[in-house]
Amino acid sequence: RYHIAKQYNLIPHLDNYVFGELMAEICRATIGTQAYLFYDQYVAKAQQHGRAFSWHQDSGYLGFPHKPYVTVWTAVDDMTMDNGTVSVLPFSTFGSQDLIPHVRDPESGDKIGYSGDQQGVAAIVPAVSLVVFSSLSLYLSGSNTTNRIRRAYVTQYSPEPINKPGADEPFHLAVPFLDNGRNVYAQKDDA
């Protein structure tokens, strides 16, 4: 698995997608009228070697209290079980919307939040499809057993800047996006 993070402002025109109207609509519908870009990353699983990612909550990787944020997982390639798509465990199936304890896997370094028998809902979707879920949702991704690379682009938006307790700077990013529902990122280019 390869993760290349914080590229939204380094790749030409990527910010048009990250701060576009589609993402604004998703944020308004999930976290509300205040939104900040918290994190972005390009994720690739190598052909025939891209390993699975255990059940986890994105919030489980922070290690301190914070308001839940929204993850938008964009399929760059057609997604299948064979190439390691994501599966999300609905709150109604798991029975909780709380942050649960995670344990670090000594072999992979992954944090694991669930080891039960539930299968979740697999995102068998064509390229350019979006899978949207809460940072408190449990999800995993399978291994890539195909002869082609599997790619996705992930953006995460928070309703407020997320700082470590006692810190004055953001844990990752805190790029202003929506203020009272208005796209302030797009407005900065017009100023």
Image: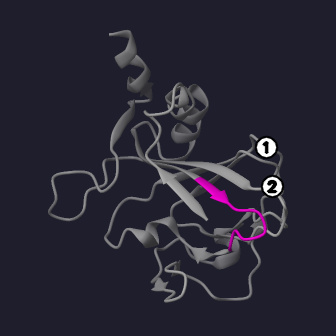
Left or right: 28 as drawn, with respect to 132: left
CB within 8 Å, label 1 to label 2:
yes
Disc number at residue 79?
Answer: 2
Number of other residues with Cα within 10 Å of mark 2, as a class: few under 14, some 14 to 19, many 20 or more: many
- Residue 63 location, x and y as percent? 35, 73
For badge 2, the amino acid type reads: Met
The x and y percentages for residue 187 are 39, 17
Residue at (55% x, 53% y) in the render: 71
Answer left or right for 190 relative to 107.
Answer: left
Q: Please tell me how many numbered marks the rendered image carries.
A: 2
Distance in Å between CA atoms under marks 1 and 2: 7 Å
Q: Is mark 1 on a helix, strand or loop?
A: loop
Q: If the image is split into quadrants, where does the N terminus sit?
A: bottom right
Kindly give the residue lying farthest to the top in the view shown: 191
> Which contiguous range is marked in magenta?
43-51
Q: Which amino acid does label 1 sit on?
A: Ala
Q: Does the magenta stretch include residue 45?
A: yes
Residue 127: give its label.
1
Tell me if mark 1 has few (under 14), some (14-19) or many (20+) residues whose alpha carbon lies within 10 angstroms of its own. some
Q: Is residue 46 above or below residue 17?
A: below
In the figure, residue 21 lies in which quadrant?
Answer: top right
State the SS at label 2.
Answer: loop
23 to the left or right of 142: left
